[in-house]
Image (tube, rainbow, N blue to C red):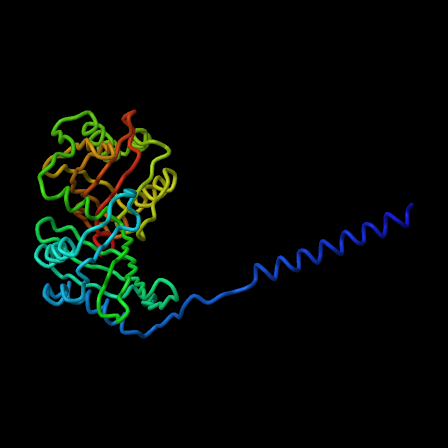
């Protein structure tokens, strides 16, 4: 009985190995469906088409498009949309030429175009490019990578269709900026403005505990002199402030102009913008320093400062 089971188990394993080996061979089989070219008349055609758009050469652009040409957004969700026709694409090219400065279309290196001659579906060119332009009316900059698939005729001298993949957000920004639009309310008097004044004058009078009480302990502190993207925590900001206080005597903080409090509709930010002249004396040599500084203090719903942005020059402290 024991011998029979052992043989039976061996045979099962052997059969399983044969099946797996056969299946692997089936999966590993390859079949070519065309040839990829890095140099091809089709690549010359599509890059010439891009140059015609940049140059505003509508006649040349039109000559490279098939009469039944279509262009589709590859990320579009409307299954019934057949894409823009030849004239609509030409009109769009005219818009780029007339409404934008500094228009350019370049290869988005290190990517480069490929031409593929498929056995069944003909000649295609795929590109990875970058479009740069500045809208003349709104000043919105377009600096956008985009990917296109061009289907060509058999002679590679006409574009039959294009599938395009890009980020549409920049076009929303352009459309939004054609018209004046409110984005919240500006206050000349507000309790958050009062909070900033009370905080500044607490530090002026050496009452650091009271000055820091207006901040959230989870707040972040940004400084134009820090590397881009870096900020300080609440405790790090206190330590930095203590270091400056040990080197400089505060003579007075003077408000310049008047602060503004902005409540934005978009993203809901609540910020006080203020301008100051800090008058200080350096303890090491008694040099008097007039120190202009601009602050943007952002508040949470509880009236605490959760973000501080400071704009000033450290050179004034070093001279």
- Count numbered badges in the picture: 0
Choose top left, top right, bottom left or bottom right for residue 131.
bottom left
Could you tell me which residue is drawn at 32 percent across and 49 percent down? 229
- 157 and 243: which one is in front? 157
Horizontally, is 232 left or right of 58 in the view? right
Horizontally, is 297 left or right of 38 in the view? left
Q: Position of residue 288 (x, y in %)?
A: 18, 48
Q: Position of residue 17 (x, y in %)?
A: 71, 57
Vertical order, 51 against 136 (above or below): below
Vertical order, 40 against 293 (above or below): below
Q: Can you say which quadrant of the picture contains the C terminus?
A: bottom left
Vertical order, 226 against 123 (above or below): above
Q: Position of residue 305 (x, y in %)?
A: 28, 32
Choose top left, top right, bottom left or bottom right for residue 99.
bottom left
Horizontally, is 137 left or right of 43 in the view? left
Vertical order, 132 against 292 (above or below): below
Horizontally, is 25 left or right of 18 in the view? left
Q: Can you say which quadrant of the picture contains the N terminus?
A: top right
Could you tell me which residue is drawn at 57 percent across and 62 percent down? 28
Q: Position of residue 133 (x, y in %)?
A: 16, 58
Choose top left, top right, bottom left or bottom right for residue 277.
top left
């Amino acid at each position: 009985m024991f011998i029979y089971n052992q043989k039976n188990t061996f045979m099962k394993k052997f059969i399983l190995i044969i099946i797996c080996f056969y299946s692997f061979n089936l999966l590993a089989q390859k079949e070519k469906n065309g040839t990829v070219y890095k140099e091809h008349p089709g690549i010359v055609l599509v890059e010439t088409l891009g140059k015609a758009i940049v140059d505003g050469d509508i006649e040349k652009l039109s000559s490279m498009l098939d009469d039944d040409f279509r262009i589709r957004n590859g990320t579009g969700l409307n299954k019934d949309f057949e894409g823009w026709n030849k004239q609509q694409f030409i009109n769009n090219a005219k818009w780029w030429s007339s409404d934008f400065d500094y228009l350019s279309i370049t290869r988005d290196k290190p990517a480069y175009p490929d031409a593929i001659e498929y056995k069944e579906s003909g000649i295609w060119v795929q590109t990875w490019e970058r479009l740069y332009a500045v809208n003349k009316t709104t000043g919105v900059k377009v600096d956008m990578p985009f990917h296109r698939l061009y289907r060509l005729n058999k002679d590679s001298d006409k574009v039959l269709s294009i599938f395009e993949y890009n980020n549409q957000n920049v076009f929303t920004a352009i459309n939004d900026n054609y018209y004046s639009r409110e984005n919240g309310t500006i206050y000349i008097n507000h309790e958050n403005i009062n909070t900033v004044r009370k905080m500044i004058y607490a530090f002026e009078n050496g009452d650091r505990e009271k000055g820091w009480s207006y901040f959230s302990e989870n707040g972040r502190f940004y400084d134009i002199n820090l590397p881009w993207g870096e900020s300080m925590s609440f405790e790090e900001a206190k330590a930095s402030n203590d270091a400056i206080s040990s080197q400089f005597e505060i003579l007075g903080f003077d408000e310049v102009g008047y602060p503004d409090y902005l409540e934005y509709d978009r993203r809901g930010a609540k910020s006080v913008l203020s301008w100051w002249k800090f008058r200080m004396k350096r303890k090491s040599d008694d040099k008097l320093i007039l120190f202009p500084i601009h602050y943007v203090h952002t508040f949470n719903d509880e009236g605490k400062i959760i973000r501080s942005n400071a704009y000033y020059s450290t050179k004034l402290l070093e001279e």
